[in-house]
Image: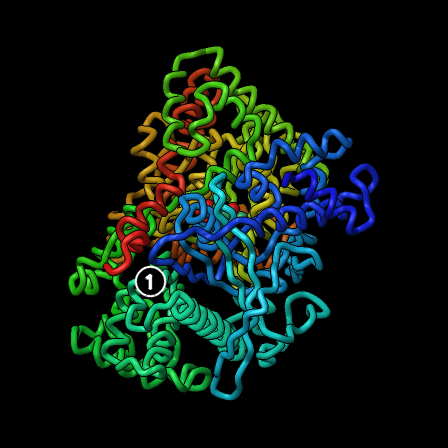
């Protein structure tokens, strides 16, 4: 059975042929053909099975990823080429499954790929959001949110016919299970992502992303993270969370039974991974289902605690979920006796109110539930785990030191190097052979090419080619003209104040004013941003507005535009990232130290030969240690300094604003120039925030940031030396393979090959 026969069969069934059908039809036929191939592949075998629960799976397009993992990419490209067709054009027709928001969801997707590729027994569990998070349109200086309907009649989703009844306080809903196949890399294994859905999903809203959040049966799976600024929106999120937790828990027990095992052996055969707190209700739900089936409560708690593990993704207080007991009482009254028992039991272990599940204000802390009733708790980079242990979760660490473990995040190099950057992949393979494709650690063999001027020149040529490709893509997609000879300075990630896009915007103002004064840079600079702002996050939307205004001002100034460009990429998603990452020169990782748990964008960009400009935050710490200080640009206060500034209340942004060099940049927000193109209300809000609050301390690090960024841009002109930096970054990136991360999860948390632990 080859891809050729499968594809021809799929086309024939549709009455089409390869020479004449359109790209859309060809995509459908290819999808169907690959699904046939995958049908013949078994899931990974083994003892224990991990169920990776996550509210998000930011999968990205699947056609190329599946072709790579099935080992069919070259054959398919050749087959299409023989008929004058191109895979890239077919791929352009594929909608990106819109099931995630940012790094956390993308991590879950990389993890599924690595679990399958390591031949580990494990499936994902999530929800089938019909309209995604939202699609971002940039319209007259603002972000406009639209529904993102990604489900095509012929998509990767398979109807399994499996369904579970999920009981809520007022009604019961049927959860239907749809699957997306997750093939491993050239190992004949195919695991699955299970996505639960309601039976009768409501159609897309007439306009935007507004809908009736009280229509639970129709709307439960409409959107990821419905607006939580209203009570009804918050309740809808809780309905979603329990729907996923209950259906997933029922699936686990069903598979346990089908495997011929008793409920008493749950922990021997299943590992449940709770990715952030959204799936936390799986803990009381499993206990409920076990006790309903005759397991006594103490034993059920024991089994579930040994089965579950929890990953913490953030130390931002606003992101640690707390549910009012009254909301839980309304949505899941049948869980209340169990939650009460779990809370009492936890209070028996620790009388410290900071570790309470159920606090004095009748709020239920989901992370606390997870920590008390999981076997392991992990942070996602060394610094993050240390901060959890020493600061944020200190009382828990004192209570359960043995539960805490670090698992530094990773990315799949199959998507983020082989898939998105063919020119670089080919060069690397030519230099060191193909072993890196199975073991990214082997990229270190590239270090032998240090000092090899001819090779470094080819590395630069590949980057140049990728920049020209990106420039074409931007022109076709957005009508934006980008100079491929300029330095590409890229900040792509969700818009959040802690990530400090606003500080980068102040740099743009500084650079603009410098150029106006006649200080032109040695080479033009293109600043690229890609970011969605949460619909209810006003200051984040104001920052997008600021960036769009700056883009206009810069472009319409003939004195500045030859030297500086600012581009906001619309609707930043995985597909956009796959175009941007290979072309990047300077990777902006400038979060306020201590605030970015890990980051994974930093890893993707490094692996593609970008040099990091960043703070010592998240996994930048590991990056810095791996590449050495000469191969990245660090600036800003340390995590310790920042934490102590918060503790003492020692930061006053107005002190920094009073410095003329800083004040001038902030004041530019309300200059006649800005107000001529921008919205006074938005800009004033931002201005006032800089002056009176600046909670994430952009002004604190601004001057250091500008100085180090200038040094970085100057160093770029020493092309041979810069190419060495690129080389070292690529060579040392292998540590960040999600295969390494997943091998560690398995070794320290899941123990999939050792049932009975
Ligand atoms: C990798 C990725 C992210 C995470 O980026 P960070 O810089 O780590 O925040 C977010 N969105 C998309 C589409 C990604 O591919």
In the figure, is residue 6 to the left or right of 514? right
Q: Residue at x 42, y 49 (%)?
A: 115
Within 10 Å of disc 1 (Cα), the crowding (few <14, some 14-19, many 20+) is many
The answer to whether any part of residue 656 appears in the image is no
Q: Picture coordinates of residue 734 (x, y %)?
A: 38, 34
Q: Residue at x 54, y 28 (%)?
A: 487
In the figure, is residue 742 to the left or right of 507? left
Identify whether 238 is placed above or below 712. Answer: below
Identify whether 387 is placed above or below 295. Answer: above
Q: Quadrant of residue 264?
A: bottom left
Q: Picture coordinates of residue 719 (x, y %)?
A: 48, 17
Identify the image quadrant of the N terminus.
Answer: top right
The answer to whether any part of residue 220 appears in the image is yes
How many numbered marks, from 0 up?
1
Q: Residue at x 62, y 27 (%)?
A: 484
Q: As rendered, which of 576 and 111 lies closer to the eye?
A: 111
In the figure, is residue 672 to the left or right of 194? right
Where is mark 1, residue-wise? Answer: 269
Q: Picture coordinates of residue 17 (x, y %)?
A: 81, 42
Mark 1: which secondary structure?
helix
Q: Picture coordinates of residue 34 (x, y %)?
A: 63, 46
Q: Residue at x 48, y 41 (%)?
A: 185
Q: As rendered, which of 469 and 50 lies closer to the eye?
A: 50
Identify the image quadrant of the C terminus.
Answer: bottom left
Q: Quadrant of residue 198?
A: bottom right
The reply to whether the residue tagged 1 has its Cβ within 8 angstroms of ligand 1 is: no
Identify whether 388 is placed above or below 507. Answer: below
């Amino acid at each position: 059975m080859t891809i050729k026969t499968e594809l021809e069969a799929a086309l024939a069934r549709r009455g089409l042929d390869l020479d004449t059908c359109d790209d859309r039809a060809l995509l459908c036929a290819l999808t169907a053909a690959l699904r046939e191939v995958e049908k013949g592949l078994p899931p990974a075998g083994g003892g224990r099975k991990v169920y990776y629960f996550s509210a998000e799976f930011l999968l990205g397009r699947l056609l190329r990823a599946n072709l790579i993992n099935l080992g069919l990419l070259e054959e398919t490209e050749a087959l299409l080429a023989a008929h004058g067709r191109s895979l890239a054009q077919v791929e352009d027709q594929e909608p990106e499954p819109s099931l995630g928001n940012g790094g956390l969801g993308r991590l879950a997707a990389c993890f599924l790929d690595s679990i399958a590729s390591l031949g580990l027994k494990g499936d994902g569990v999530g929800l089938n959001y019909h309209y995604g998070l939202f699609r971002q349109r940039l319209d007259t200086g603002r972000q406009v949110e639209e529904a993102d309907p990604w489900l095509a009649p012929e998509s990767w989703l398979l109807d399994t016919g499996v369904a579970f009844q999920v009981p809520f306080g007022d009604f019961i809903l049927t959860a239907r299970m749809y699957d997306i196949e997750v093939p491993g890399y050239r190992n004949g294994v195919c695991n699955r992502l299970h996505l639960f859905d309601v039976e009768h999903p409501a159609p897309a809203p007439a306009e935007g992303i507004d809908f009736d959040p009280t229509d639970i049966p129709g709307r439960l799976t409409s959107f990821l993270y419905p607006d939580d600024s209203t009570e009804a929106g918050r309740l809808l999120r809780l309905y979603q969370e329990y729907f996923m937790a209950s259906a997933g828990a029922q699936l686990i027990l069903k598979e346990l039974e089908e495997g011929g095992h008793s409920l008493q052996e749950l922990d021997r055969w299943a590992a449940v991974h709770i990715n952030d707190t959204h799936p936390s209700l799986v803990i009381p739900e499993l206990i409920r289902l076990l006790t309903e089936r005759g397991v006594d409560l103490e034993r059920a708690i024991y089994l579930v605690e040994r089965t579950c593990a929890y990953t913490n993704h953030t130390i931002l207080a606003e992101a640690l979920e707390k549910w009012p007991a009254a909301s839980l009482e309304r949505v899941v009254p049948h869980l209340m006796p169990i939650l009460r028992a779990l809370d009492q039991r936890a209070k028996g272990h620790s009388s410290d109110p900071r570790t309470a599940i159920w606090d004095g204000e009748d709020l239920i802390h989901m992370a606390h539930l997870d920590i008390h009733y999981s076997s392991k708790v992990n942070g996602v980079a060394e610094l993050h785990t240390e901060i959890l242990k020493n600061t944020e979760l200190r009382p828990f660490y004192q209570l359960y030191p043995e539960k805490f473990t670090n698992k530094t995040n990773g990315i799949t190099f199959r998507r983020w190097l082989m898939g998105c950057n063919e020119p670089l992949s080919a060069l690397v393979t030519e230099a060191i052979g193909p072993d890196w494709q199975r073991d990214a650690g082997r990229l270190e063999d590239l270090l032998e090419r240090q000092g090899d001027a001819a090779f470094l020149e080819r590395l630069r040529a590949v980057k140049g080619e990728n920049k020209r490709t990106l420039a074409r893509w931007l022109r076709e997609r957005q009508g934006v003209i980008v100079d491929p000879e300029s330095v590409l300075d890229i900040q792509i990630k969700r818009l959040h104040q802690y990530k400090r896009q606003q500080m980068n915007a102040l740099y743009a103002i500084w650079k603009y004013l410098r150029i106006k004064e006649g200080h032109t840079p040695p080479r033009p600079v293109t600043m690229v941003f890609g970011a969605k702002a949460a619909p209810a996050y006003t200051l984040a939307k104001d920052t997008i507005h600021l960036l769009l205004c700056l883009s206009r001002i810069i472009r319409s100034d003939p004195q500045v535009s030859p030297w500086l460009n600012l581009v906001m990429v619309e609707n930043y998603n995985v597909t956009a990232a796959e175009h941007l990452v290979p072309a990047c020169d300077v990777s902006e990782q400038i979060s306020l130290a201590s605030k970015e748990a890990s980051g994974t964008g930093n890893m993707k960009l490094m692996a593609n030969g970008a040099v990091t400009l960043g703070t010592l935050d998240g996994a930048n710490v590991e990056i810095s240690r791996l590449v050495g200080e000469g191969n990245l640009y660090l600036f800003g206060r340390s995590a310790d300094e920042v934490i102590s500034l918060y503790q003492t209340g020692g930061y006053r942004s107005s002190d920094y604003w009073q410095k003329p060099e800083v004040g001038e940049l902030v004041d530019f927000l309300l200059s006649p120039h800005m107000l001529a193109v921008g919205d006074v209300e938005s800009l004033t809000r931002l201005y006032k925030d800089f002056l009176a609050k600046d909670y994430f301390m952009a002004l604190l690090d601004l001057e250091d940031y500008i100085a180090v960024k200038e040094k970085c841009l100057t160093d770029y002109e020493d092309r041979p030396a810069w190419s060495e930096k690129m080389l070292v970054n690529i060579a040392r990136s292998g540590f960040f393979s999600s295969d390494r991360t997943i091998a560690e999860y398995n070794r320290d948390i899941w123990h999939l090959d050792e049932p009975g632990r």
